[in-house]
Every structure is written in C-alpha cells, then in structure tokens.
Amino acid sequence: MKTVITSTGNEVNSLFDKRFGRAAWFCVLDEATGETKFYQNENKDAQGGAGTKTVEKMVELGVSKVISGDFGPKAKDLLDKFNIQMVIIQDDDVTVDDVIRKIK
Amino acid sequence: MPRRRRLRRIVSPPGFKGYRPYGANSEMSGHIELLYEEYEALKLADYSHMNHLEASKLMGVSRATFARIYESARRKIAQALVESKEIKTAYGDAFLDKDWYVCNDCYVRFTLPHHHRGRRCPICKSERIEMVTQK
Amino acid sequence: MAIKIAIASGKGGTGKTTVSVNLYHFINRLVTPKVQLVDCDVEEPNDLLFFKDSEEVTKETINQLIPRIDNDKCTYCRKCTEWCEYNAIVVIPPVEFAEVNGSLCHSCGACLVACEFDAMKEYPEPIGDVTFYKTQDGNGLAEGRLKIGSAMQTMLIKELKKRVPDDAEWILFDAPPGTSCPVVETVSDADYIVLVTEPTPFGLHDLKLMIEMLKDIKQPFGVIVNKAGLGNNDVYEYLEKENIEIIGKIPFDKDYASKYAAGNLLKDISPETEQRYKEIIEKLKTKL
C-alpha cells in the first residue's frame, strides 16, 4: 500500500510540509517494505488549482493514503471520489521520518 | 473569499432517523431537518445539563457559535411541534463531504474510505476514534 | 462622449461611497442632470442605500460560460489541461476521469479550441446581477451584485460597464477598495480618477500602493483628503513631495458620520459641504 507524506525537502530528514497542493515534495512510502521515493511538486507555485492537480498526481501514483496538514475543499472532494484516505497531522516541527515512524 | 466552516465535533450521532407526529397529516405539513450538531447541542445542554461553555468546548466551537447552534435546534423543534412537522436528522452539507474521524489517542483527523476496513486510527492504530462532522 | 470619473482608494472606509454619492448629487444639481452613478463594488454594493426612494428599472442575470466534458467523446488526452491557464480542468487517464472545476474557470475558451474531439461544450452559470435603478434626480444608479461564492468580480464589472447607457454626460464609477484586478478593471478606461484617502498611516500606506498602480497603467488622478483633521500630516507631506494635486479636503465631522450610518447622506446637506463639492467639481472640470 502506497502512502504519500507531504514534505518540504527530498529526504526523510526533511520537515513534514503541512500544505497539500503546495507542498514542495511528496514522499511516497511503501508501507509493506518501508521504501521511500521522493517526487517534486510541479504545481507548488500554481496560481490556482494546485490541490486538484496534486490529486491527479496522487491517482497516477496509485496512492491510497495521503498524510498532510490540511486539504482544501476541492482536493478533498476529489480524493474522496477516488477513495484515497486523508490524514491530517497538525504537529509543528516533525520530520517525514517522524511521521513514518508513527505509522509503524 | 467565503470563510470555511469549522469542524463541529459530534460525540455520537443521533440513534434515529427522524420523528413523525401522529394524529396529524404530517406529509402535508412537510418536515424540518435537524442537523447533527443541533441534535448534539440540544443533548449536551438539555439532556446532559452542561452549561454552554462546557458544551462548546466539547464540540470544538466558540461559546457564541454553540449558542447559535443550540438556538437553531430549539427553534426547529418548536416549529415541528407547533406545525405538526416531521423531524428528520441530517448531516447538513456533510452528505457531500466525507466524514471525518478523530483519534482520541494521537489527535489526528482522517477519513475512512470504504475499502479501508477496520475502524482504526491510520497513524497509531488506536481503536479509540470518533466521528467529527462538518457543517 | 461621456466624461468618465472613477472614485477609488487603496484603503477601505476612506469615503469612496460618500464622495461618489455626493458628486452624483451635486453634478446633477450644478452641472447636468445627465449623470449616471455606477456602483462597481460588486462584492458589497452600497450606493443604493443612500437613495431611499429609488425604483428598480431592470435587472439582468450575468452568466459566465463554463465548459463541461462529454465523457463519451473525451479520449483523456489531457490537451485541454495543458492549455488551461487556471488549472481548472482535471483529467486522470488511468481512471478515465475528466472534469472542469467551475470555481477556477475563467471562461477563456482555450479548452474548446484545444479539444480535437469535440468533447467540450459551454453552459451558462450565473455570476451575479446587474440592476438599474431610477433615482429622484439624475440618470440613475447601476449596480453589479456578485453571487455569493463567485470569484468573477472583474468579469461582472466588465459586463456592468458594458451596459451603462452612453446618453449620460458624466459617468461616475464607485470602485471597490484595494488595488487588485476588479479595481484596475474599474479605473482602466476612466478619464480621471479621484482617489479618496484619509490622513492616517493606513490611509497613506494604501494610497501609495494605489498611486503606484495608477502610474503603472498611466491614468491621471487627483486626491481628496477625507476626514481631514484626523490623524497626522504625513499624507500632505507625501503628496507635496510627490507633486500630486489635492483636489479637495473634507473635514472630519462626527454628525456627518452618523448621517452616513443612517443612510441620510443627501438629507439636509450643510452649506459648507455643498461649497466643498462645488469646488471639487470645478477642479474636476479643469482636468477634462
């Protein structure tokens, strides 16, 4: 099962990004193997529609769970439609690795 | 931009779908929709005898917002009784929105899509989760 | 051709509406009854409040065209999403999903050109109303009122301006506050812009932003200092240094503020107020 954790950088020690559509990077975690892979967010600085574009990406990556700080209403509707689970973590100053360790 | 509505916490949704008056033709007089948070407000204030401040904290809204929800609930019930209307419970806008759940151990919020079996927190796997509804 | 004057300010609450409504009143009395007031603050139009005996003449719903995707024709090629400047189209080929997001769409029509499979078709969606009112004197008031939740202010202002009849000699545009697109749309084709400010730090800060914007689009303007006597002298020093003309000063008056709040701006106007607007109108005439 693939899980995406929004990240400010391209490694597990990077801080968790609380933005979804405007996160800098996406960390794709394979929960079975613990393997991680990072993708840069091309829509980070889009004028509008960053959230929905990001959902496109999530569906293409075949993700079933997204962990972020919040989801906009449009992104939420779409994620719902594709049965992708949303998880909201509001903690400050946690790294992607901290989040990964919490899941385990 | 329109401001987004805050999440309102519901400890447990009503255990019924509605009430219907008898001895009156309620189909003729229509129905009112009692929102989940209105039911919750009424329950906390008039059944659990909490004061507004306590109740508002429990629902995660300001005291003033709680008062507004509670007032709305009472008016709807009164209207239903006086005008022999049915009472139906509704999420409000929530049927468009996915239900949110909150974990009482690690405090994350999350949705539970159909294929995610088992009602557990996706982070800490706790079973102590409850529904939060949005309106 | 009608003389077009836009009344704008960076900061909200400086007196755009007060000045607009008064100018309308005095131009009607002193210059010509062929004066038209246009409330371009489509998010919160309020000029109407000061014309208690006004009557609605016409009301028109303004639509924007939003495309929908015909899933039978769509091949999920994503060309439309590449053309869409506003990220308003979501196409996800693996799950055969294609949808236009109405709240992001600017009705530019690019996707209709882009689509090679005739899968895009436009449908009207209301964004607001344009209403014309008859007032006791003058040509009347035109008002745009944006539908709650719509973000198409600029488009509605454009449509509102299109509908203003050109038989008026003077047209006054009451602009929204700020310096964003709806304001640019309001002031862009005016012959002269009256900036209303107040002598406070906030008033000055936003006035500077406004002046920068007007210099950018090369539009002529002058400043009315409203609520004169309040705050400090910074605004005057700034205007003098920048060599910007003050076309009027309206002193702060608490009774006047209460009259505004009660909607009685045009009732029992004091001789001083009248004199000030007379002078402002005379100055305006020399600018055109």
Image: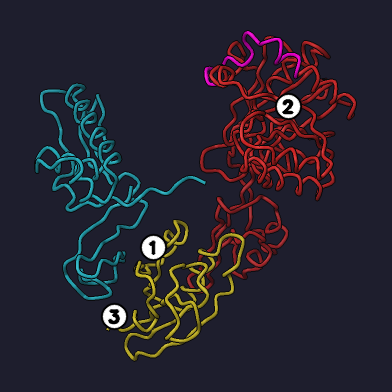
Chain colours: A yellow, B cyan, C red
Q: Quadrant of residue C44?
A: top right
Which circle, 2 or 3, is nearer the viewer? 2
Under tag 2, what secondary structure? strand
Q: Quadrant of residue A76?
A: bottom left
- Which portion, as a residue range, is magenta? C261-276
Rounded to the nearest angstrom, the CA distance separating label 1 from label 2 is: 57 Å
Within 10 Å of the Cα at label 3, are there few (<14), some (14-19), or many (20+) other Cα atoms? few
- The answer to whether B44 is drawn above or below residue A76 in the figure is above
Residue contact between numbered discs 1 and 2, judged by CB atoms under 8 Å: no
> Which label was assigned to residue C126?
none
Residue C284 highlighted magenta (yes or no): no
Give the residue number, with chain letter if any, for mark 1: A80
- The answer to whether B21 is drawn above or below residue B123 in the figure is above
Of marks 1 and 3, which one's residue comes earlier in the chain?
A: 1
Front-lying residue, B30 or B77: B77
Which circle, 1 or 2, is nearer the viewer? 2
Image location of residue C65, percent across then percent down = 64, 45
Within 10 Å of the Cα at label 2, are there few (<14), some (14-19), or many (20+) other Cα atoms? many
Give the residue number, with chain letter if any, for mark 3: A103
Image location of residue C262, percent across then percent down = 52, 17
Q: Is residue B86 left or right of residue C57?
A: left
Front-lying residue, C79 or B127: B127
Q: For mark 2, name the chain.
A: C
Q: For mark 3, name the chain.
A: A
Residue contact between numbered discs 2 and 3, judged by CB atoms under 8 Å: no
Under tag 3, what secondary structure? helix
